[in-house]
């Protein structure tokens, strides 16, 4: 897709390292500052899809910024500034090697496992007789850790502590933060007629202090249902209308791709990419209650470079 950012290759003043993620590219400045560029890449089943989605990076970055600001009273977070619609700059932390997935409903991969007869996820027992998209009595935390091949693997609280990935005291603090963040996200979604179904949080440490890092409550890390149609759809056994990446996953499944060896990614037409873009923009407007203002994309790479360099220069003056 033209006018999308799918690759970055910047050389910022004071740059000491760069890490290219599936969607976000992280530039380390003088070892203590992180410049996170949210690209228009889209991934599913741990695979980066070949086409970029217009405005996706801007949507994700601006939603994450809004929620980082709205939850900073719960847990300190890494964000310092957002000098460009697709960029967040903040404190570089040492990330914990665990992602805190929290689920309010039996959906997505948890349902796919449940359907196979699995009755315990990450050491959390699940009752018999549940239906797809049913609400849990209380939200459950199902952490994941990165396997050697880059896939996310489920892991229990007990295994995390036993393997020394996180100390018991720190894990319990992170667990409290996770429940509190999910509660805040649930309340903010409800105000906009949405249900926060599940999401994930990442944490890091700097100078002995725990920080919330990366992004939160965006359609890449979270699943949302529309409140008004959820009950009726659930009772009929139909899929509730949702705003998340799940519809991209479903499209891939229907077209014979689930990230398995030998499977071919279906063609992503311009029309399909624009439809995905519209879904992301729709979620932005519903979640924030604000009209999405499309940033200028004619000279995307140059715009980002200029904004980041200006920020870093001005910062060094203070």
Image (cartoon, grey):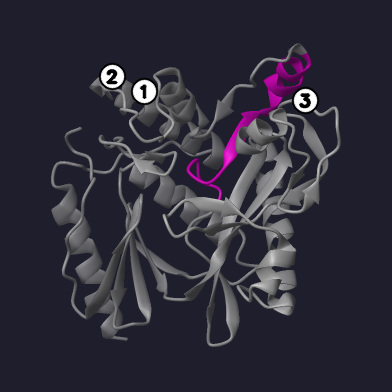
**Could you say where residue 264 lies in the image, as x and y percent from the top left?**
31, 27
Badge 2 is on which residue? 271
Residue 123 on the magenta segment:
no
Badge 1 is on which residue? 275
Residue extending farthest to the front is 262
State the SS at label 3.
loop
**Could you say where residue 317 lies in the image, as x and y percent from the top left?**
26, 85
- Say above or below: 81 vs 258: below
- Residue 252 or residue 60, whichever sits in front: 252
**Could you say where residue 54 lies in the image, as x and y percent from the top left?**
29, 35
Q: Nearer the observer, disc 3 or disc 2?
A: 3
- Say above or below: 75 vs 201: below
Badge 3 is on which residue? 131
Magenta residues (range):
217-235
Q: Tell me the CA gap for discs 1 and 2.
A: 6 Å
Q: Are marks 1 and 2 in contact (CB under 8 Å)?
A: yes
- Say above or below: 207 vs 91: below
Crowding at label 3, few (<14), some or many (≥20) Cα neighbours within 10 Å?
A: some
């Amino acid at each position: 897709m033209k006018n999308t950012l799918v690759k970055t290759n910047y050389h910022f003043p004071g740059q000491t390292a760069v890490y290219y993620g599936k969607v976000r590219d992280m530039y380390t400045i003088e070892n203590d500052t992180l410049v996170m560029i949210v690209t228009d890449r889209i991934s599913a089943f741990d695979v980066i899809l070949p086409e970029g989605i217009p405005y996706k990076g801007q949507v994700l970055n601006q939603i994450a910024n809004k929620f980082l600001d709205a939850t900073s009273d719960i847990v300190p977070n890494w964000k310092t500034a957002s000098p460009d619609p697709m960029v967040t700059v903040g404190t570089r932390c040492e990330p914990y090697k665990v992602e805190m997935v929290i689920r309010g409903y039996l959906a997505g991969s948890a349902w796919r496992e449940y359907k196979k007869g699995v009755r315990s996820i990450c050491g959390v027992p699940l009752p018999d007789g549940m239906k797809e998209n049913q609400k849990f009595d209380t939200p459950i935390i199902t952490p994941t850790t990165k396997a050697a091949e880059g896939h996310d693997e489920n892991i229990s609280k007990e295994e995390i502590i036993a393997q020394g990935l996180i100390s018991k005291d720190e894990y319990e603090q992170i667990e409290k933060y996770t429940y509190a963040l999910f509660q805040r996200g649930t309340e903010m979604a409800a105000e906009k007629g949405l249900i926060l179904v599940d999401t994930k949080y990442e944490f890091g440490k700097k100078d002995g202090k725990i920080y919330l890092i990366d992004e939160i409550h965006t359609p890449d890390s979270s699943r949302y249902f529309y409140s008004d149609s959820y009950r009726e759809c659930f009772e009929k056994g139909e899929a509730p209308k949702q705003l998340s990446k799940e519809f991209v996953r479903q499209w891939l499944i229907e077209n014979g791709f689930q990230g398995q060896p030998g499977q071919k990614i279906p063609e992503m037409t311009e029309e399909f990419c624009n439809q995905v873009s519209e879904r992301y923009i729709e979620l932005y407007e519903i979640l924030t209650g604000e009209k999405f203002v499309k940033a200028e994309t004619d000279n995307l790479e140059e715009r980002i470079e200029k904004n980041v360099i200006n920020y870093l220069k001005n910062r060094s003056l203070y």
